[in-house]
Amino acid sequence: MLAEIIEPEDPYYETVRACHELGIIRPVANGDFRLDQALNRYEVAHLTIETLKALGIEVPTDDKQVRYHDIPGGHWAYDDVAGCVNLGLMGGFEDLSFYGRRNMLKEHWLAMASALAVKFAPLPDPEDAQQVPAYSDLPELNWLWNPINTLASYGWLDPDTMEDDFLNRNDAVTRRLLYWYLGRLIIARMGESDLRDEGAAGESYSESDAQGEKQGESSSHPDMDLEG
């Protein structure tokens, strides 16, 4: 099934495989996994919390209040957003809105991935550190350098970010990019051998399962863009 998602020669293969073996990756529609589809902020919150829970990481539930006026209490992503907010992974905007249906921007995801590394990954090995490119579109004193350097210290910067002289920080986050950083966290927490064992022992997730879940979500998750 993994061969249907990504080729082994793809530089994102190992992290996509890690997410797949932990059960995080499911078909979006008609068996299509759409690795290059843009994700909105609700979807990023949902997949992040799902990953943390699958890794056995406790997500705070003592205070689920989300103080953003555009997320009603019964919203399908309410608990996911609350979990990310309570963990210090995500926040809203100055007008007290979350804007969950907006595309997640790369700069915000890199900051979030940096926080995931610091909070939940083992301490980095200096031998894994990456040399950060001198991005021509990122000013020298920009706030984003801090999370970028943190990710580089863990050896987590994705292939495109490492090989391009342009950061393109306002690009939308794709599933491929999301799976890269969630996959790096999974591998860091579980290790390659444990992950293979877990994947072999775990239940497979079929297209029929995905279609059933999709039908269930269509009524309870009205804002989730399952069709793209």
Image (cartoon, rainbow, N blue to C red):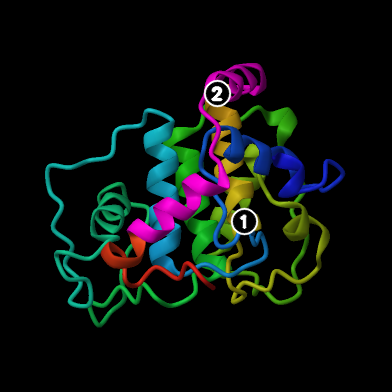
Q: Residue visible at 59% across and 76% down?
A: 170
Q: Which residue in the protein does label 2 denote?
A: 190
**Picture layout, residue 151 above or below residue 125:** below
**In terms of image quadrants, where is residue 66?**
bottom left
Check disc 2 and report its element: helix, strand or loop: helix
Q: Quadrant of the N terminus?
A: top right
Residue 114 visible: no
Q: Which residue is mark 1?
A: 31
Q: Nearer the viewer, residue 45 or 92?
A: 45
Q: Position of residue 212 (x, y in %)?
A: 42, 52
Residue segment shown in magenta: 191-216
- Disc 1 residue crowd, few under 14, some 14–19, many 20+, Cα 10 Å: some
N-term-proximal mark, 2 vs 1: 1
Q: What is the distance, in whole Å, between disc 2 and disc 1 at their CAs?
A: 28 Å
Quick one: 72 or 163, which is closer to the camera?
72
Which three-letter amino acid code belongs to the residue tagged 2?
A: Met
Q: Nearer the viewer, mark 2 or mark 1?
A: 1
User: Can you tell which mark lies on residue 69?
Assistant: none
